Image (tube, coloured by chain):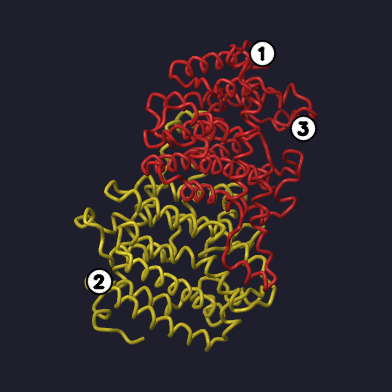
Chain colours: A yellow, B red
Amino acid sequence: MQQTNKEAIFDFTSYLDVRRARLEKALDFYLSERSESRESLEKNNWKPSTLYEAMRYSALSGGKRLRAALTIAGAEAVERAPQLKDLDPVELVLPLCAAIEMIHAMSLIHDDLPCLDNDDLRRGKPTNHKVFGEAMALLAGDGLLVMAQEVLLSYCHEKIDKGALLSVSLELCRATGPSGMVGGQVLDMEFTGQSVSEEVVRNIHARKTGALIKFSLWAGGALLQAPERQLQSLARLGEIIGLAFQITDDLLDVTGSAESLGKTPGKDQASNKATWVSIFGVEGAKAKLKEMEKEGKELIKESSLDNPSYPALQSLLSYSINREK
Amino acid sequence: MQQTNKEAIFDFTSYLDVRRARLEKALDFYLSERSESRESLEKNNWKPSTLYEAMRYSALSGGKRLRAALTIAGAEAVERAPQLKDLDPVELVLPLCAAIEMIHAMSLIHDDLPCLDNDDLRRGKPTNHKVFGEAMALLAGDGLLVMAQEVLLSYCHEKIDKGALLSVSLELCRATGPSGMVGGQVLDMEFTGQSVSEEVVRNIHARKTGALIKFSLWAGGALLQAPERQLQSLARLGEIIGLAFQITDDLLDVTGSAESLGKTPGKDQASNKATWVSIFGVEGAKAKLKEMEKEGKELIKESSLDNPSYPALQSLLSYSINREK
């Protein structure tokens, strides 16, 4: 990948590390139980932290935090509303980032359950239901799904415009529910084992993983009331990155090693899942990625999203395409 | 039960029927799939309606609709914001009612799953997972949980105050998530088979069923910006009705017949669940109900919630205590 001078100077890894640390701290805070009646229940032998333990196990288990990074990069790239000019854009979107990562964690917990993918390992650790049992994993997923909206609404900075918050909250629902992630999961389940067209693969991924990634990028700008032109570019860039991420995932499933991936490769092929590689072949998928990288770079430039202090959007775009795990 | 003249004249059954019919129509509309890509997917042999079918199966399967009735009765009883004076209060809270009933339906789907209560029958019909399989039931529950907020936020009347909507949306999360319904479900699971104190039983029920019922009554007024004094009374009345409902449930489990209940009685006792009857005994529980009915009636009167056209709050209070199934 050819890098511009600006990208070469920008330290993407430490950019991500600093922001990831703030996100982890925020998530840890939001997922601390503060029940008034805890003490009285403890007297009665209740283990009050079981549900929170289960939610924290998955929500605080690391991971790439790609979605939160996109939200933050979007927030830092846009021109924000006048009343927010003097505030730290990262601080302003932390509850939103936490909400998105909770939804992502929840989707992994439910997907791993025996009735769906029946996975025992996730990020090299036993899956949630292997540790806490199926009932608790089910409820931890439900809990995280609700907590996401709760955190977004209750910890949002008072200077955030109410209309912007409502619109972000609604779009989070759309990205998550039947028209988004949950709907995509159903499609994925129903088409497994069938030979499918490019259109169907695109639709499955656009919903199952794409919708939340697209939302993540758009929402960082939308919450800060960025101009419509920038929001449209963020949304399109989110589509590109989401699709690129999925194509790369499919490629790595074919070309990667268990060691570099931290999971067993070839699983999609073995279960006959619809993937981009099964549609385009390895070379076709790589060409598609190059094309998308080009479109994304142009979008960033045209919409003045190339923040000179933090050219993180370019780096995230390149990362989603060139990552090795 | 002694009735005042006003209550005797008021036809509670037809009051409920008219409102329930509007709710069912709204729910049916909100749960119709309107995906643009449906046609193209159908060409690829996708059964697009499976997820919606599963969600509709549970959300439109009737039931008492107590929660929606409470929301409507609350909305009709309060003094609403000036900009809403000329509008129909029932129309204004229909998306909220639908959201609440979706959450309730979702909780039943997940509770019935094999890893939790493992129930085959619900309201005399096979449970969701018996019809659609465990994976689809899991996802239908997830879908309804998200759709609830989506419907509330996207169909809310434009004249509803944004701050009021945000506050209702946040309280819905609190009533539903770890501090409410989901948390109560965890407690219920953890304490099953243990001998417990009144305090623990109260806490379990306040969260598992009470939180959503309390929310339902309060939210009908809160969305229409009722005066704080009325909102406080609605919240307290919601606590009373929620608790009364649960005590009555526990009593019916002991004293009711399978025929009148539509479900097997004695199940709680058999599984050694913590109930009000196990704490107070049958007579004690009945006395508690009488006491609560008195407090509720006084609250309604003191806070001018006794709407002369629709004295539905009184009737709902009496119903929650005197029902036979």
User: Label 3: few (<14), some or many (≥20) within 10 Å?
Assistant: some
Mark 2 or mark 1: which is in front? 2
Q: Which chain carries label 3?
A: B
- Dot 2 falls on a residue whose secondary structure is loop
Kindly report the distance in space between the C-alpha atoms of the residues bearing marks 2 and 1: 72 Å
Q: Which residue lies furthest to the bottom in this view?
A: A283
The disc label shown at residue B283, or none: 1
User: Label 2: few (<14), some or many (≥20) within 10 Å?
Assistant: some
Q: Which amino acid does label 2 sit on?
A: Asn
Q: Residue furthest left?
A: A86
* Left or right of residue B205, residue B267 in this image: right
Q: Are marks 2 and 1 on the same chain?
A: no
**Is residue B107 depicted above or below A64 in this figure?**
above
The disc label shown at residue B92, or none: none
**Is residue A43 depicted above or below B285 in this figure?**
below
Task: Give the camera-side residue of A44 and B224.
Answer: B224
Q: Earlier in the sequence, mark 1 or mark 3?
A: 3
Task: Give the camera-side residue of B192 and B9.
Answer: B9
Residue positioned 35% across, 46% down in the render: A155
Q: What residue type is labelled 1?
A: Glu
Q: Mark 1 lies on which chain?
A: B
Residue B113 drawn at (x, y percent): 68, 47
**Is residue B158 depicted above or below A312 in this figure?**
above
Instruction: Identify the residue under disc 3.
Output: B264
Residue positioned 48% across, 40% down in the render: B172
